[in-house]
Image (spheres, rainbow, N blue to C red):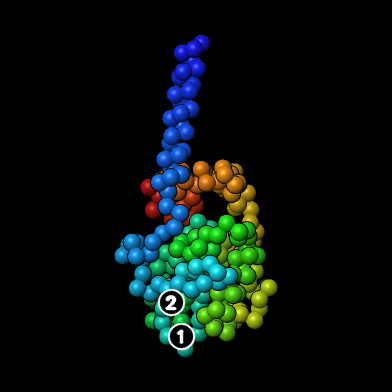
């Protein structure tokens, strides 16, 4: 019996040590100067602040041209648009791809509730911050729901609306793994392991990528 307790204690200690290591070694903020060389189209990247929080975006083309605002999907970033941004700019558009709060290189404040409605409010304030009167909003998946919410709640910022495979609600966050990641205390542990998990990344991208890109 004593041996079993010792084994259980050793296993618990190992698990605790692994969790502590993950928590202590995980970077809470990304230093842009350390990573920008690995970011696609980083030369077009800029940062601004909305409600005191950093927003990362990439801007292409002449600002005098009609503006296209590209909004990525869940667990994605401006990278989603890297193959089309320059091409759209060459076609005569002023193109802006933005990282939603909590994604990419934008801030990840704990006070933000990360709902579609709140992301839409951030987008409206972001457009106002940049001094853009109206834009055509292009939203993919979760970004489509955000774009539609902007059009409904802040129509003064929307010229046209283009939805690409859009969802209509926050149900994606009801999945067990995302509910756990959102819990205080537990979330920090779960997300620390998931962000370094190639298997989790493949699972999340499986339904996003074409079959020939599944590996």
Q: Is residue 202 above or below residue 8?
A: below
Q: Position of residue 203 (x, y in %)?
A: 47, 46
As drawn, the residue found furthest toward the top would be 1
Residue under the image location 65 percent in, 59 percent down: 169
Q: Position of residue 27 (x, y in %)?
A: 42, 52
- List the residue tagged with mark 2: 59
Q: Is residue 35 left or right of residue 110?
A: left
Q: Quadrant of residue 145?
A: bottom right
Q: Position of residue 127 (x, y in %)?
A: 56, 77
Structural crowding at the residue carrying mark 2, measured as other residues with C-alpha within 10 Å and reported as few (<14), some (14–19) or many (≥20): many
Q: Residue furthest bottom?
A: 64
> Residue at (56%, 42%) from the top-left corner?
186
Q: Work out whether 129 lies above or below 111.
A: below
Mark 2 to mark 1: distance in Å? 9 Å
Q: Is residue 176 visible?
A: yes
As drawn, 106 above or below 91: above
Whether the residues at callouts 2 and 1 have beta carbons within 8 Å, the answer is: yes
Task: Count the numbered circles shown.
Answer: 2
Q: Answer with left or right where residue 139 lies relative to residue 91.
A: right
> Residue at image x 48%, y 23%?
9
Residue 34 % position (x, y): 33, 61
Q: Residues within 10 Å of mark 1 (few under 14, many from 20)?
A: few
Residue 153 lies in what quarter of the image?
Answer: bottom right
Q: Which label sits on residue 63?
A: 1
């Amino acid at each position: 019996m004593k041996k079993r307790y010792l084994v259980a204690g050793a296993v618990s200690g190992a698990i605790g040590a692994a969790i502590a290591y993950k928590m202590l070694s995980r970077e809470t903020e990304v230093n842009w100067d350390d990573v920008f060389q690995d970011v696609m189209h980083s030369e077009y990247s800029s940062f601004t602040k909305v409600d005191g929080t950093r927003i990362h975006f990439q801007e292409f083309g002449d600002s005098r041209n009609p503006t296209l605002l590209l909004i990525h999907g869940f667990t994605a970033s401006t990278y989603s648009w890297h193959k089309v941004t320059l091409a759209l700019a060459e076609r005569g558009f002023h193109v802006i791809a933005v990282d939603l709060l909590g994604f990419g290189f934008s801030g990840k404040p704990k006070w933000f509730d990360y709902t579609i409605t709140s992301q839409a409010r951030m987008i409206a304030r972001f457009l106002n911050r940049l001094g853009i009167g109206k834009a055509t909003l292009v939203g993919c998946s979760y970004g489509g729901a955000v774009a539609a919410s902007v059009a409904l709640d802040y129509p003064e910022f929307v010229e046209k609306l283009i939805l690409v495979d859009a969802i209509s609600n926050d149900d994606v966050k009801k999945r067990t793994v995302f509910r756990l990641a959102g819990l205080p205390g537990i979330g920090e542990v779960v997300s620390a392991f998931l962000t370094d998990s190639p298997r989790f990344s493949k699972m999340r991208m499986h339904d996003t990528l074409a079959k020939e890109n599944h590996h």
